[in-house]
Protein backbone atom coordinates (compact mmCIF):
# COMPACT_ATOMS: atom_id res chain seq x y z
CA UNK A 1 0.00 0.00 0.00
CA UNK A 2 1.27 3.52 -0.73
CA UNK A 3 2.30 5.67 2.21
CA UNK A 4 -0.24 7.98 3.73
CA UNK A 5 -0.47 11.39 2.15
CA UNK A 6 1.09 14.21 4.15
CA UNK A 7 -1.42 16.50 5.81
CA UNK A 8 -1.06 20.17 6.64
CA UNK A 9 -3.13 21.65 9.43
CA UNK A 10 -3.63 25.39 9.05
CA UNK A 11 -4.89 27.30 12.06
CA UNK A 12 -5.22 31.01 12.70
CA UNK A 13 -4.05 32.18 16.09
CA UNK A 14 -6.10 35.37 15.73
CA UNK A 15 -9.40 33.47 15.78
CA UNK A 16 -9.02 32.70 19.49
CA UNK A 17 -8.14 36.27 20.45
CA UNK A 18 -10.78 38.27 22.30
CA UNK A 19 -12.52 41.25 20.76
CA UNK A 20 -11.40 44.73 21.68
CA UNK A 21 -13.95 46.62 23.73
CA UNK A 22 -16.53 48.94 22.16
CA UNK A 23 -16.20 47.54 18.62
CA UNK A 24 -19.30 47.91 16.46
CA UNK A 25 -20.51 45.02 14.31
CA UNK A 26 -19.30 46.91 11.23
CA UNK A 27 -15.82 47.28 12.73
CA UNK A 28 -15.72 43.58 13.58
CA UNK A 29 -16.56 42.62 10.00
CA UNK A 30 -14.00 45.11 8.67
CA UNK A 31 -11.12 44.00 10.91
CA UNK A 32 -11.59 40.26 11.51
CA UNK A 33 -14.32 38.81 9.29
CA UNK A 34 -13.18 35.19 9.74
CA UNK A 35 -13.52 35.35 13.51
CA UNK A 36 -17.03 36.78 13.49
CA UNK A 37 -18.14 34.34 10.77
CA UNK A 38 -16.88 31.42 12.85
CA UNK A 39 -18.85 32.74 15.81
CA UNK A 40 -22.05 32.60 13.76
CA UNK A 41 -21.29 29.01 12.71
CA UNK A 42 -20.51 28.05 16.31
CA UNK A 43 -23.87 29.47 17.38
CA UNK A 44 -25.61 27.24 14.84
CA UNK A 45 -23.84 24.05 15.92
CA UNK A 46 -24.02 24.85 19.62
CA UNK A 47 -27.00 25.01 21.92
CA UNK A 48 -29.40 26.39 19.32
CA UNK A 49 -29.74 23.92 16.41
CA UNK A 50 -32.60 25.98 14.92
CA UNK A 51 -30.33 28.99 14.45
CA UNK A 52 -30.31 30.07 10.78
CA UNK A 53 -26.70 31.04 10.17
CA UNK A 54 -27.41 32.15 6.59
CA UNK A 55 -30.06 34.68 7.57
CA UNK A 56 -28.04 35.79 10.59
CA UNK A 57 -25.00 36.53 8.44
CA UNK A 58 -27.08 38.44 5.89
CA UNK A 59 -28.77 40.48 8.60
CA UNK A 60 -25.46 41.20 10.30
CA UNK A 61 -23.60 42.49 7.23
CA UNK A 62 -26.72 44.30 5.97
CA UNK A 63 -26.20 43.21 2.39
CA UNK A 64 -28.52 41.37 -0.04
CA UNK A 65 -28.01 37.64 -0.40
CA UNK A 66 -26.31 37.92 -3.78
CA UNK A 67 -23.44 39.89 -2.20
CA UNK A 68 -22.71 36.99 0.15
CA UNK A 69 -22.97 34.54 -2.74
CA UNK A 70 -20.46 36.61 -4.70
CA UNK A 71 -17.97 36.25 -1.86
CA UNK A 72 -18.67 32.53 -1.63
CA UNK A 73 -18.21 32.00 -5.39
CA UNK A 74 -15.08 34.16 -5.46
CA UNK A 75 -13.47 32.36 -2.53
CA UNK A 76 -14.36 29.00 -4.09
CA UNK A 77 -12.65 29.99 -7.34
CA UNK A 78 -9.62 31.26 -5.43
CA UNK A 79 -9.40 27.99 -3.53
CA UNK A 80 -9.46 26.05 -6.81
CA UNK A 81 -6.69 28.26 -8.19
CA UNK A 82 -4.65 27.75 -5.02
CA UNK A 83 -5.12 23.98 -5.29
CA UNK A 84 -4.02 24.05 -8.92
CA UNK A 85 -0.94 26.07 -7.99
CA UNK A 86 -0.03 23.67 -5.17
CA UNK A 87 -0.60 20.60 -7.35
CA UNK A 88 1.74 21.84 -10.08
CA UNK A 89 4.47 22.64 -7.56
CA UNK A 90 4.12 19.27 -5.81
CA UNK A 91 4.20 17.08 -8.92
CA UNK A 92 5.78 19.15 -11.69
CA UNK A 93 8.19 21.45 -9.88
CA UNK A 94 11.17 19.23 -10.70
CA UNK A 95 14.51 20.14 -12.27
CA UNK A 96 15.54 19.02 -15.76
CA UNK A 97 19.20 18.92 -16.73
CA UNK A 98 19.30 20.22 -20.31
CA UNK A 99 22.41 22.40 -20.87
CA UNK A 100 21.26 23.56 -24.31
CA UNK A 101 17.65 24.01 -23.21
CA UNK A 102 16.35 21.60 -25.86
CA UNK A 103 14.40 18.40 -25.21
CA UNK A 104 14.56 15.36 -27.52
CA UNK A 105 11.74 14.75 -29.99
CA UNK A 106 10.88 11.58 -28.06
CA UNK A 107 9.73 13.75 -25.14
CA UNK A 108 7.09 15.55 -27.20
CA UNK A 109 5.94 12.38 -28.96
CA UNK A 110 4.19 11.36 -25.74
CA UNK A 111 1.72 14.26 -25.94
CA UNK A 112 -1.64 13.27 -27.52
CA UNK A 113 -3.14 15.46 -30.24
CA UNK A 114 -5.76 16.88 -27.84
CA UNK A 115 -3.07 17.91 -25.35
CA UNK A 116 -0.88 19.45 -28.06
CA UNK A 117 -3.91 21.42 -29.23
CA UNK A 118 -4.56 22.86 -25.77
CA UNK A 119 -0.89 23.78 -25.32
CA UNK A 120 -0.79 25.45 -28.73
CA UNK A 121 -3.90 27.47 -27.89
CA UNK A 122 -3.07 28.65 -24.35
CA UNK A 123 0.71 29.23 -24.64
CA UNK A 124 3.24 31.05 -26.79
CA UNK A 125 6.89 30.24 -27.35
CA UNK A 126 7.66 33.90 -27.98
CA UNK A 127 10.12 35.22 -30.60
CA UNK A 128 12.81 32.67 -29.70
CA UNK A 129 11.60 30.03 -32.16
CA UNK A 130 11.35 26.41 -31.04
CA UNK A 131 13.75 27.24 -28.19
CA UNK A 132 10.93 29.22 -26.58
CA UNK A 133 8.59 26.25 -26.71
CA UNK A 134 11.24 23.96 -25.24
CA UNK A 135 11.82 26.47 -22.45
CA UNK A 136 8.17 26.14 -21.39
CA UNK A 137 8.91 22.51 -20.50
CA UNK A 138 12.47 22.91 -19.18
CA UNK A 139 11.95 25.98 -16.98
CA UNK A 140 10.23 24.95 -13.73
CA UNK A 141 7.89 27.97 -13.18
CA UNK A 142 6.83 27.98 -16.84
CA UNK A 143 6.16 24.23 -16.75
CA UNK A 144 4.02 24.63 -13.63
CA UNK A 145 2.08 27.46 -15.26
CA UNK A 146 1.58 25.38 -18.42
CA UNK A 147 0.22 22.40 -16.46
CA UNK A 148 -2.07 24.76 -14.53
CA UNK A 149 -3.27 26.21 -17.85
CA UNK A 150 -4.21 22.75 -19.12
CA UNK A 151 -6.18 22.04 -15.92
CA UNK A 152 -7.79 25.50 -16.00
CA UNK A 153 -8.77 25.14 -19.65
CA UNK A 154 -10.49 21.79 -19.07
CA UNK A 155 -12.25 22.93 -15.89
CA UNK A 156 -13.65 26.10 -17.46
CA UNK A 157 -14.81 24.46 -20.69
CA UNK A 158 -16.00 21.11 -19.35
CA UNK A 159 -17.17 21.94 -15.82
CA UNK A 160 -18.05 25.61 -15.33
CA UNK A 161 -19.52 26.12 -18.80
CA UNK A 162 -21.52 22.89 -18.71
CA UNK A 163 -25.26 23.52 -18.58
CA UNK A 164 -25.72 20.97 -15.76
CA UNK A 165 -22.58 19.17 -14.72
CA UNK A 166 -23.42 15.65 -13.61
CA UNK A 167 -26.86 15.63 -15.14
CA UNK A 168 -28.12 12.50 -16.89
CA UNK A 169 -29.29 12.32 -20.50
CA UNK A 170 -32.86 13.23 -19.58
CA UNK A 171 -31.73 16.29 -17.62
CA UNK A 172 -29.49 17.52 -20.44
CA UNK A 173 -32.20 17.06 -23.07
CA UNK A 174 -34.60 19.09 -20.93
CA UNK A 175 -32.06 21.93 -20.81
CA UNK A 176 -31.48 21.75 -24.58
CA UNK A 177 -35.23 21.92 -25.17
CA UNK A 178 -35.40 25.06 -23.03
CA UNK A 179 -32.71 26.61 -25.20
CA UNK A 180 -34.78 25.91 -28.29
CA UNK A 181 -38.06 27.10 -26.79
CA UNK A 182 -36.63 30.40 -25.52
CA UNK A 183 -33.92 31.11 -28.11
CA UNK A 184 -35.46 34.49 -28.98
CA UNK A 185 -35.75 35.70 -25.39
CA UNK A 186 -33.34 37.77 -23.33
CA UNK A 187 -30.37 35.93 -21.82
CA UNK A 188 -31.46 36.80 -18.29
CA UNK A 189 -34.88 35.29 -18.98
CA UNK A 190 -33.34 32.08 -20.32
CA UNK A 191 -31.14 31.93 -17.24
CA UNK A 192 -34.25 31.94 -15.04
CA UNK A 193 -35.75 29.05 -17.01
CA UNK A 194 -32.52 27.07 -16.72
CA UNK A 195 -32.26 27.64 -12.97
CA UNK A 196 -35.91 26.69 -12.45
CA UNK A 197 -35.43 23.47 -14.42
CA UNK A 198 -32.30 22.55 -12.46
CA UNK A 199 -34.02 23.31 -9.15
CA UNK A 200 -36.96 21.07 -10.00
CA UNK A 201 -34.51 18.31 -10.95
CA UNK A 202 -32.29 18.54 -7.88
CA UNK A 203 -34.99 19.38 -5.35
CA UNK A 204 -38.13 17.27 -5.83
CA UNK A 205 -41.39 18.56 -4.37
CA UNK A 206 -41.32 15.97 -1.58
CA UNK A 207 -37.76 16.87 -0.49
CA UNK A 208 -36.51 19.65 1.78
CA UNK A 209 -32.94 19.48 0.52
CA UNK A 210 -31.13 19.63 -2.79
CA UNK A 211 -29.76 16.39 -4.20
CA UNK A 212 -26.65 15.99 -6.31
CA UNK A 213 -27.13 15.20 -10.03
CA UNK A 214 -27.45 11.46 -10.58
CA UNK A 215 -24.52 11.25 -12.99
CA UNK A 216 -22.15 13.46 -10.98
CA UNK A 217 -19.73 10.71 -9.94
CA UNK A 218 -19.31 9.39 -13.49
CA UNK A 219 -18.90 12.88 -14.89
CA UNK A 220 -16.26 13.79 -12.29
CA UNK A 221 -14.31 10.61 -12.98
CA UNK A 222 -14.40 11.30 -16.72
CA UNK A 223 -12.97 14.81 -16.29
CA UNK A 224 -10.34 13.57 -13.82
CA UNK A 225 -9.24 10.93 -16.33
CA UNK A 226 -9.11 13.52 -19.13
CA UNK A 227 -6.94 15.91 -17.09
CA UNK A 228 -4.69 13.07 -15.95
CA UNK A 229 -4.20 11.97 -19.56
CA UNK A 230 -3.34 15.53 -20.59
CA UNK A 231 -0.71 16.15 -17.91
CA UNK A 232 0.72 12.62 -17.62
CA UNK A 233 3.42 13.25 -20.30
CA UNK A 234 4.89 15.96 -18.05
CA UNK A 235 5.42 13.26 -15.44
CA UNK A 236 7.82 11.12 -17.51
CA UNK A 237 10.34 9.56 -15.08
CA UNK A 238 13.40 9.99 -17.29
CA UNK A 239 13.01 13.77 -17.24
CA UNK A 240 13.10 13.98 -13.47
CA UNK A 241 16.18 14.41 -11.31
CA UNK A 242 14.36 14.08 -7.99
CA UNK A 243 11.40 12.16 -6.63
CA UNK A 244 8.00 13.61 -5.87
CA UNK A 245 4.78 12.39 -4.25
CA UNK A 246 3.51 8.99 -5.46
CA UNK A 247 1.38 9.15 -8.60
CA UNK A 248 -1.86 7.92 -6.92
CA UNK A 249 -1.86 11.15 -4.93
CA UNK A 250 -1.86 13.10 -8.20
CA UNK A 251 -5.16 11.48 -9.20
CA UNK A 252 -6.55 12.22 -5.74
CA UNK A 253 -5.56 15.88 -5.92
CA UNK A 254 -7.01 16.28 -9.43
CA UNK A 255 -10.21 14.64 -8.16
CA UNK A 256 -10.46 17.15 -5.29
CA UNK A 257 -10.15 20.08 -7.70
CA UNK A 258 -12.75 18.71 -10.13
CA UNK A 259 -15.25 17.91 -7.36
CA UNK A 260 -14.97 21.41 -5.92
CA UNK A 261 -15.36 22.94 -9.38
CA UNK A 262 -18.38 20.71 -10.06
CA UNK A 263 -20.18 21.74 -6.87
CA UNK A 264 -19.39 25.39 -7.54
CA UNK A 265 -20.67 25.07 -11.11
CA UNK A 266 -23.97 23.57 -9.92
CA UNK A 267 -24.34 26.31 -7.31
CA UNK A 268 -23.82 28.99 -9.95
CA UNK A 269 -26.38 27.38 -12.28
CA UNK A 270 -28.97 27.37 -9.49
CA UNK A 271 -28.93 31.18 -9.30
CA UNK A 272 -31.88 32.45 -11.39
CA UNK A 273 -30.82 36.10 -11.30
CA UNK A 274 -27.10 35.93 -12.13
CA UNK A 275 -25.29 35.21 -15.38
CA UNK A 276 -21.69 34.19 -14.68
CA UNK A 277 -19.46 35.05 -17.62
CA UNK A 278 -15.98 33.56 -18.00
CA UNK A 279 -14.05 36.20 -19.93
CA UNK A 280 -11.38 34.43 -22.00
CA UNK A 281 -7.70 35.24 -21.58
CA UNK A 282 -5.50 35.22 -24.67
CA UNK A 283 -1.79 34.62 -25.16
CA UNK A 284 0.37 37.45 -26.54
CA UNK A 285 -2.07 39.99 -25.11
CA UNK A 286 -0.98 43.08 -23.16
CA UNK A 287 -1.14 42.45 -19.42
CA UNK A 288 -3.85 44.54 -17.76
CA UNK A 289 -3.75 44.59 -13.96
CA UNK A 290 -7.42 45.59 -13.69
CA UNK A 291 -8.55 42.28 -15.17
CA UNK A 292 -5.55 39.94 -14.87
CA UNK A 293 -3.49 38.33 -12.10
CA UNK A 294 0.14 37.52 -12.91
CA UNK A 295 1.38 34.01 -12.05
CA UNK A 296 5.02 35.20 -11.99
CA UNK A 297 4.50 38.70 -10.64
CA UNK A 298 7.72 38.85 -8.58
CA UNK A 299 9.80 37.76 -11.57
CA UNK A 300 8.14 40.37 -13.79
CA UNK A 301 8.82 43.10 -11.22
CA UNK A 302 12.48 42.09 -10.96
CA UNK A 303 12.94 41.98 -14.73
CA UNK A 304 11.14 45.25 -15.43
CA UNK A 305 13.38 46.89 -18.09
CA UNK A 306 12.12 50.37 -17.23
CA UNK A 307 13.16 50.14 -13.60
CA UNK A 308 16.76 50.72 -12.52
CA UNK A 309 17.22 48.72 -9.33
CA UNK A 310 20.25 48.64 -7.07
CA UNK A 311 22.03 45.32 -6.69
CA UNK A 312 20.82 44.91 -3.11
CA UNK A 313 17.24 44.96 -4.42
CA UNK A 314 17.89 42.13 -6.89
CA UNK A 315 18.35 38.39 -6.57
CA UNK A 316 21.77 36.90 -7.48
CA UNK A 317 20.22 35.32 -10.59
CA UNK A 318 18.83 38.66 -11.74
CA UNK A 319 22.17 40.40 -11.19
CA UNK A 320 23.87 37.81 -13.43
CA UNK A 321 21.13 38.12 -16.08
CA UNK A 322 21.41 41.90 -16.21
CA UNK A 323 25.20 41.80 -16.41
CA UNK A 324 24.92 39.92 -19.72
CA UNK A 325 22.68 42.53 -21.37
CA UNK A 326 24.33 45.10 -23.62
CA UNK A 327 23.59 48.81 -23.28
CA UNK A 328 21.97 48.76 -26.72
CA UNK A 329 19.61 45.97 -25.65
CA UNK A 330 18.80 47.76 -22.38
CA UNK A 331 17.80 50.84 -24.35
CA UNK A 332 15.64 48.83 -26.76
CA UNK A 333 13.97 46.89 -23.93
CA UNK A 334 12.67 50.06 -22.28
CA UNK A 335 9.85 50.01 -24.84
CA UNK A 336 8.95 46.38 -24.11
CA UNK A 337 5.50 45.61 -22.70
CA UNK A 338 4.28 43.04 -20.18
CA UNK A 339 2.66 40.34 -22.34
CA UNK A 340 0.68 37.22 -21.54
CA UNK A 341 2.68 34.14 -22.50
CA UNK A 342 0.39 31.50 -20.95
CA UNK A 343 -3.36 31.92 -20.41
CA UNK A 344 -4.03 29.84 -17.30
CA UNK A 345 -7.63 30.59 -16.35
CA UNK A 346 -10.39 32.96 -17.43
CA UNK A 347 -11.71 35.79 -15.29
CA UNK A 348 -15.27 35.60 -13.91
CA UNK A 349 -17.82 38.42 -13.92
CA UNK A 350 -21.33 38.24 -12.46
CA UNK A 351 -24.07 40.08 -14.40
CA UNK A 352 -27.47 40.94 -12.90
CA UNK A 353 -30.52 42.68 -14.29
CA UNK A 354 -31.92 45.73 -12.51
CA UNK A 355 -30.81 48.36 -10.00
CA UNK A 356 -29.69 48.09 -6.38
CA UNK A 357 -31.39 45.52 -4.17
CA UNK A 358 -32.39 45.91 -0.54
CA UNK A 359 -30.47 44.11 2.25
CA UNK A 360 -33.49 41.84 2.74
CA UNK A 361 -33.40 40.65 -0.89
CA UNK A 362 -32.95 36.89 -1.41
CA UNK A 363 -32.79 34.47 -4.32
CA UNK A 364 -36.39 33.44 -3.73
CA UNK A 365 -37.70 36.99 -3.29
CA UNK A 366 -35.85 39.86 -4.91
CA UNK A 367 -36.50 43.28 -3.36
CA UNK A 368 -35.26 46.42 -5.09
CA UNK A 369 -34.79 49.79 -3.43
CA UNK A 370 -37.34 51.12 -5.92
CA UNK A 371 -39.88 48.88 -7.72
CA UNK A 372 -39.16 50.55 -11.06
CA UNK A 373 -35.51 49.43 -10.81
CA UNK A 374 -36.42 45.76 -11.28
CA UNK A 375 -35.53 45.78 -14.99
CA UNK A 376 -33.58 49.01 -15.24
CA UNK A 377 -29.98 48.56 -16.35
CA UNK A 378 -27.48 45.75 -15.79
CA UNK A 379 -25.10 45.43 -12.86
CA UNK A 380 -21.68 43.80 -13.25
CA UNK A 381 -19.19 42.65 -10.63
CA UNK A 382 -15.82 41.06 -11.40
CA UNK A 383 -15.38 38.14 -9.01
CA UNK A 384 -11.93 36.94 -10.05
CA UNK A 385 -9.22 38.21 -12.37
CA UNK A 386 -7.88 36.19 -15.25
CA UNK A 387 -4.78 34.16 -14.36
CA UNK A 388 -1.80 34.47 -16.71
CA UNK A 389 1.94 33.86 -16.96
CA UNK A 390 3.75 36.89 -18.39
CA UNK A 391 6.95 37.90 -20.17
CA UNK A 392 8.55 41.20 -21.14
CA UNK A 393 8.76 41.82 -24.87
CA UNK A 394 6.94 42.88 -28.02
CA UNK A 395 3.72 41.30 -29.19
CA UNK A 396 3.46 39.29 -32.36
CA UNK A 397 2.54 41.43 -35.39
CA UNK A 398 0.30 40.57 -38.32
CA UNK A 399 -0.45 42.36 -41.59
CA UNK A 400 -3.04 41.20 -44.11
CA UNK A 401 -3.36 37.92 -42.21
CA UNK A 402 0.37 37.18 -42.36
CA UNK A 403 3.14 37.57 -39.79
CA UNK A 404 4.91 40.91 -39.92
CA UNK A 405 7.58 40.74 -37.21
CA UNK A 406 10.94 42.52 -37.36
CA UNK A 407 13.97 40.99 -35.69
CA UNK A 408 15.33 44.37 -34.54
CA UNK A 409 12.12 45.10 -32.61
CA UNK A 410 12.65 42.01 -30.43
CA UNK A 411 16.38 42.44 -29.90
CA UNK A 412 18.25 39.64 -28.15
CA UNK A 413 15.03 37.64 -27.72
CA UNK A 414 14.81 36.98 -31.45
CA UNK A 415 15.80 33.44 -32.47
CA UNK A 416 14.04 32.31 -35.64
CA UNK A 417 10.94 34.31 -34.68
CA UNK A 418 7.52 33.11 -33.56
CA UNK A 419 6.80 29.45 -34.19
CA UNK A 420 3.77 27.25 -33.59
CA UNK A 421 3.92 24.37 -31.13
CA UNK A 422 3.55 21.96 -34.05
CA UNK A 423 6.89 23.24 -35.41
CA UNK A 424 8.70 21.56 -32.51
CA UNK A 425 10.24 18.19 -33.42
CA UNK A 426 8.10 15.35 -32.09
CA UNK A 427 4.87 17.34 -31.63
CA UNK A 428 1.93 15.81 -33.47
CA UNK A 429 0.39 18.02 -36.17
CA UNK A 430 -3.05 18.28 -34.59
CA UNK A 431 -4.01 21.18 -36.87
CA UNK A 432 -3.30 19.13 -39.98
CA UNK A 433 -5.37 16.27 -38.56
CA UNK A 434 -8.40 18.56 -38.15
CA UNK A 435 -8.24 20.00 -41.66
Image (cartoon, rainbow, N blue to C red):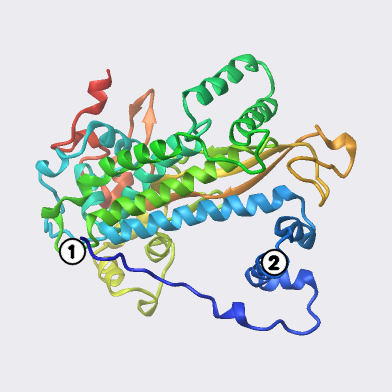
The reply to whether the C-beta atoms of the residues labelled 1 and 2 are less than 8 Å apart is: no
Q: Residue at x 25, y 54 (%)?
A: 248
Name the foreground residue: 317 vs 323. 317
Q: Is residue 19 above or below residue 226?
A: below
Q: Residue at x 22, y 61 (%)?
A: 2
Q: Is residue 232 visible?
A: yes
Position of residue 251 measured from the top left corner of the image (x, y, whole percent): 30, 50
Q: Which quadrant is the N terminus positioned in?
A: bottom left
Give the residue at mark 2.
40
Frontmost of labels 1 and 2 is 2
Q: Residue at x 57, y 17 (%)?
A: 177
Name the foreground residue: 263 vs 298. 263
- Quadrant of residue 364 in the image? top right
In screen coordinates, is 57 left or right of 320?
Answer: right
Give the residue at mark 1.
243
In screen coordinates, is 248 left or right of 110?
Answer: right
Q: Is residue 153 above or below residue 98?
A: above
Amino acid sequence: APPAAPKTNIASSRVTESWKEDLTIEEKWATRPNKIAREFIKAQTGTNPQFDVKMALQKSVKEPEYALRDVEIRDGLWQIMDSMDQLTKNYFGYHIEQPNGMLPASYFEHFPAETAKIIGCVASGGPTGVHGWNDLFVDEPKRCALVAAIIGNVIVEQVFQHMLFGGNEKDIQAMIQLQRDHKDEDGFERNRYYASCIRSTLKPADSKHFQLPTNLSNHVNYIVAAIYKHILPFEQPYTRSDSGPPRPFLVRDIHDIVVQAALLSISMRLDPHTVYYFEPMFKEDTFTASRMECFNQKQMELQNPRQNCKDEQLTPEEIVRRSKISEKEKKRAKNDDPLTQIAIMDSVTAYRLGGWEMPSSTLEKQQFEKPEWARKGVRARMLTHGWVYCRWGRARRFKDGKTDDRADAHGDQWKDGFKEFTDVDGVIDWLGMER
